[in-house]
Amino acid sequence: MVIRHILVLFILVITATAPAYAITSLQASVDRNPVIEGESLVLTVVADDDLNSGELNTSALLKDFIVGRTSISRSKQIMNFDARNETRWQVLLSPKSRGNVTIPAFQIKGVSSDPITLSVVDRSSQPQQKQDIFMRASLSSEEAYVGQMLTYRVKLFLALELQRGVLSAPVLQGAQIKQLGEDKDSNEIINGKRYRVIERAYAIVADQPGELTINGASFSGDVLVQAKRNGGMFSFNESRPTQTQAPKSVVLINPEPVEYQGQWLVSDLVVLKEDWPESPVEYKVGDPITRTLTLLASNADETSLPELQLSMPSALKSYPEKPQRKSFVRDKQMVSQLTQTTAIVATKAGTYTLPEIKVPWWNPHLKQQQYATLPARTIVVTGGATEIAIAPAATNTATNTDAGYWPWVSAIFAFLWLVTLVLWLNARKQQPQNSQPLENDDVTLPVNSRKILESSCAAKDPTAVINALSAYFTDIYAKPMNLQDIGKQSTELSSMVIALQQSAYSKQSTNIDYQRLLKLALSTKAANKQQGTSALSPLNPKS
């Protein structure tokens, strides 16, 4: 009896460890037929043998299908001392056209599967509420202008449980695109069927006129479906790859109108505000007067907002700060903001008028040019302490013919000045004729802004480089320099500035030679310094 049990156990071990028989069956099936145009299906190929993943050749599918991800799994079953291996391929397919399409027969080691005739029907032939997954897309307008921001919204409807997935942006050329805000996750019931809805918004800004073709946003991922295997009475959840795409859209992009005057700005609404005292305020000579202007534009990109040009009387000196730009989403609309702060200092007393400020913009709905305006402001400046002290002295001079001790004081200061000048000339003549400039002449250069520019280029951060460029050139020229002013330095620098903007404000990466950009910026500094030296050299006395 013991020997019989040992023998049976030995046979079981030999049977379980024995090599599997060669492949005898190859079956192919699809998870749906017919399939809707633009959607995907899963092709499953099952072989009754343990095979390598490369045994299945799917190149014949490329003629009529877009072949996506392929997954492979293996299993082994032992029933009544019979071991059975199984290799399963799952291929994600998307038909290229409507009509009847044939999935060809596959062949592995002389064993073939049966071909499958697949029917691809029009999307409109089946209501969306019967689909488990589909996408909808909408545009804020079917017609726009160059530089106008379009809002592209896409919704992904899922009636199945999502395991993982990626929602990709629409594909287009001749325009910039970036995501607006965060995704929204909600639920909707459509004709009695519950869907999970994932919504995302994109901002699209066209760079050139003509027809803009937008290939819809797409989704690819894995969902859980109920499946039965081998005729079992129990079902279980099985992971299935899936993908879908939103319909294609075409937008007509109009050029800038010929009758428009000013820097081009197209928006749904433009508002100009300022931070200014409501009641009249008197200022003194030398007191800084702070004026903060804010430009707001609805559905416009922040880079398209023009800098505010302020004109004022000659007796008022202005010191503008670098404009601050930002954008935010409010009521499902992108709002761009430019804030510019200027310090105004009066050099003498009087009543001055700050002129009216007008910013032109184009209204795409009314198709006409409009203006965002601020009214003229009046400033009353009174004399300061210095001016009040000078006034009595001037009165005494007019009424008193005796000059007093002032001529003697002036003579003494003139004599001391002449002595100082003679000593300086003697010291100058004692210097060698071939003397060279000091090595520390560069102390007046913008060292901090240069270091920031160098570190930003080394980090290859386009946004940081843009800010560093503006600060660097502002220090070089001692006046505010925007990207447009920087681009005027040279054609090559202008093209690099454009590439920086595209890389910073769009998701499409742009190849930028940051070392070349840094070299161009520093060479501009060297040229500026050389001009300053040549301008001062005639003032140096010759030995």
Image: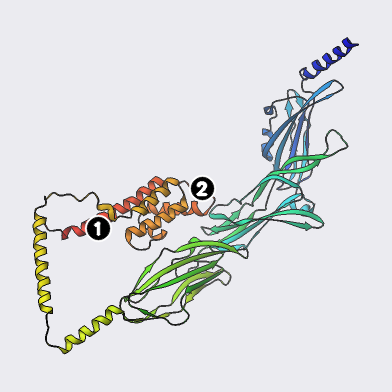
Q: Earlier in the sequence, mark 1 or mark 2?
A: 2
230 shown above or below 34: above
Q: Residue furthest front?
A: 405
Q: Residue furthest top?
A: 3
Residue drawn at 51 percent across, 58 percent down = 208
Say whether residue 341 is left or right of residue 58.
left
291 shown above or below 448: below
Total numbered labels placed on residues in the image: 2
Depth check: 415 or 352 in front?
A: 415
The image position of residue 130, as x and y in percent, is 80, 52
Is residue 192 visible in the rendered structure shown here?
yes
The image position of residue 486, as x and y in percent, is 38, 57
The local secondary structure at tag 1 comes to: helix
Depth check: 57 or 399 in front?
A: 399
The local secondary structure at tag 2 comes to: loop
Residue drawn at 44 percent across, 67 percent down = 340
Q: Amino acid at mark 2?
A: Ser
Depth check: 258 or 23 in front?
A: 23
- Label 2: few (<14), some (14–19) or many (≥20) C-alpha neighbours in 10 Å: few
- Label 1: few (<14), some (14–19) or many (≥20) C-alpha neighbours in 10 Å: few
The image position of residue 326, as x and y in percent, is 51, 61
Snapshot quadrant of residue 153: bottom right
Q: Calculate the distance from the C-alpha at mark 1 to the C-alpha at mark 2.
A: 39 Å
83 shown above or below 422: above
Is residue 32 visible in the rendered structure shown here?
no
Please tell me whether mark 1 or mark 2 is closer to you in this view.
1
**Residue that carries the numbered disc 2 in the rendered image:** 509
Q: Amino acid at mark 1?
A: Gly
Snapshot quadrant of residue 180: bottom right
* Residue 532 numbered mark, or none: 1
Q: Quadrant of the C terminus?
A: bottom left
Q: Residue furthest bottom?
A: 399
